Amino acid sequence: MIAEFAPADRRNLFNAIVYSGIPAGGVLASLAAIVAEDAIGWRGLFWLGALPMVTLLPLAIVRMPESPRWLLARGRVAEARAVCASTGIPLPEAEVSAPGDRVGFAALARRPLRRPTLLLGSMSFCGLLLTYGLNTWLPQIMSEAGYDAKGSLSFLLVLNGGAIVGGLIASRVADRTGPQRVVAATFCLAALALVVLTSGAPLGILLVAVAGAGIGAIGTQVLIYGFVSGYYPTSSRAAGVAWCAGFGRLGGIGGPLVGGLLLGAGVTSATAFHLFAGVALVGAAVTLTVPRRTTGPVDPVPSSAGQTRSNTAARP
């Protein structure tokens, strides 16, 4: 959906703005735990976490526009025109598939998308393993390193705050230079930051390192979603994003499990951070092996400047 409505020259930025809701929720959760846990307890914090679902889901059902390309593919041209008119994007051309062309998940299993699909899924696996592993265990790991409960939660706040700011900046760079090298660089940033966390540096440097880990873990995953949505043609884009998100969730499950196993085995915080740093380096290596697209997306949205010129020219 984001790739469809965003201008081509700011697609990664728009994607990052939307997915920044994830670390923003992490920031609010950390603040709520620091400020309100003593008053309402952990059960009360769970009730607070349910409020966005109760309030935003009905709003999304009522106000979120449907995909114009999805409507066109089903012959609902008038509805597609209405959505484009209300959102200010041009009406896309209906996609024409040659007889025998594969679409959706079937296209992902065939050349030329089969190998990139496996690699993109592996990138997402590494990104979500880092994201969920650090979000789940960073407070406990820092507590084991000698910080009190509120101090450990403050590290979690910095982790997610760094992901928001750094992710938005990195996404703008990705729009200008391409997302592949930016994703590899942010994975490497995560590895470096996690190693710094084991160095016994002063608190100020540790906070900077935690912010860097947030950029390299959560911010990287935001960039991966933008990379994936721009990699696939329309006929298989939804399936490609779903595959990467779904396969990546295995890493999201594995991150907390790995952290729990390490802490249960009595390993040091340095060992845990080094393991997560290794995952980040694997993610960077996998990213650099993704083949470049031979063609761009089938139907990109025009750039914001081009769209403005087009709209101006269309006025009487």
Image (tube, rainbow, N blue to C red):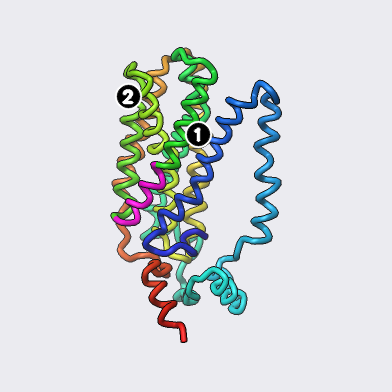
Q: Nearer the viewer, mark 1 or mark 2?
A: 2
Secondary structure of residue under mark 1:
helix
Q: Residue at x 70, y 46 (%)?
A: 54
The reply to whether residue 22 is visible in this rendering is: yes
Residue 315 image point, x, y percent? 46, 83
Which of the 4 image quarters holds residue 123? top left
Q: Earlier in the sequence, mark 1 or mark 2?
A: 1
The reply to whether residue 129 is visible in this rendering is: no
Residue 286 image point, x, y percent? 33, 43
Amino acid type indicated by mark 2: Val
Magenta segment, which residues? 166-176
Amino acid type indicated by mark 1: Tyr
Residue 148 image point, x, y percent? 51, 15
Label ID, residue 132: 1
Residue placed under numbered mark 2 in the picture: 196
Residue 135 image point, x, y percent? 50, 31
- Considering the whole magenta stretch, tell me its main secondary structure: helix
Label ID, residue 154: none
Q: Is residue 297 above or below residue 269?
A: below
Residue toward you, 144 or 260: 144
- Specify whether residue 107 is painted magenta: no
Q: Residue at x 54, y 72 (%)?
A: 84
